[in-house]
Image (tube, rainbow, N blue to C red):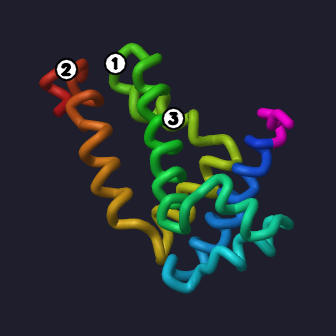
Amino acid sequence: MKKQPQITEKTRQKFIEVFCGLYSQKPIEKISVQEIANNSGYNRSTFYQYFTDIYALLDAVENDLLNDIKKELANKELSMHTVQESLHCMDKREHLLVLNALLGDYGSFHFLKRLKNEVAMDQFVSNIPQNML
């Protein structure tokens, strides 16, 4: 039987949504695969069809968000408003949920480091007039 892409993506997004909700409330070490599966309405074996463990899920969440930010930046002409305009891609509910989890009290220091490394600030300031810096 072939998997249906819409259902597959919906299931994956549900795991991400539940994980981010939990991660914004407690440290990753206190989150179990069973808890994510139960709160998602799926069983553990379904979780493992998508992710090898909770840390792989965290990596997927970080990668998805960073890729969306970089994609949005690539589609913008650099200007003084590039940062602000590029962050408009974050107005989707799932992005806000992810940002809340990654930047919250129990968030990922690793994500902040990746954000600084992968979305270089010189992309933002290269077209700003020198007298404004």
Task: Quadrant for residue 8, please give it.
Answer: top right
Task: From the image, tell me which residue sits under label 3.
Answer: 68
Asked if labels 3 and 2 touch by Cβ distance under 8 angstroms, the answer is: no
**In the structure shown, which secondary structural element does the residue marked by tag 1 occupy?**
loop
Q: Which residue is mark 1?
A: 78
Horizontal and vertical percent position of residue 72: 49, 26
For this view, does 126 lie left or right of residue 114? left
Q: Residue at x 56, y 82 (%)?
A: 26
Q: Secondary structure at mark 3?
A: helix
Q: Which residue is mark 2?
A: 129
**Residue at (20%, 31%) from the top-left corner?**
122
User: In this view, which residue lies farthest toward the bottom?
Assistant: 30
Between the C-alphas of marks 2 and 3, the distance is 27 Å
- Asked whether residue 91 is drawn in magenta, I would say no
Residue 44 or 75: which is nearer the viewer?
44
On screen, residue 49 above or below 103: above
Image position, residue 103 (x, y; %): 46, 63
Measure how far apart labels 1 and 2 are at the Cα level: 12 Å
Mark 1 or 2, which is nearer the eye?
Answer: 1
Q: Does label 2 or label 3 sit earlier along the sequence?
A: 3
Q: Which residues are magenta?
A: 1-7
Mark closer to the chain start, 3 or 1? 3
Q: Position of residue 80 (x, y in %)?
A: 34, 25
Of residues 53 and 132, the one nearer the viewer is 53
Where the N terminus falls, by quadrant?
A: top right
**Mark 3: few/some/many CA within 10 Å (<14, 14-19, 20+):** some
- Compared across the picture, whether 34 is left or right of 77 comes to right
**Distance of mark 3 from mark 1, alpha carbons?**
17 Å
Type of the residue with mark 3: Asp
Residue at coordinates 52% horizontally, 51% vertically from top-left? 60
- Could you tell which of marks 1 and 2 lies nearer the N-terminus? 1
Q: Nearer the viewer, residue 87 or 14?
A: 14
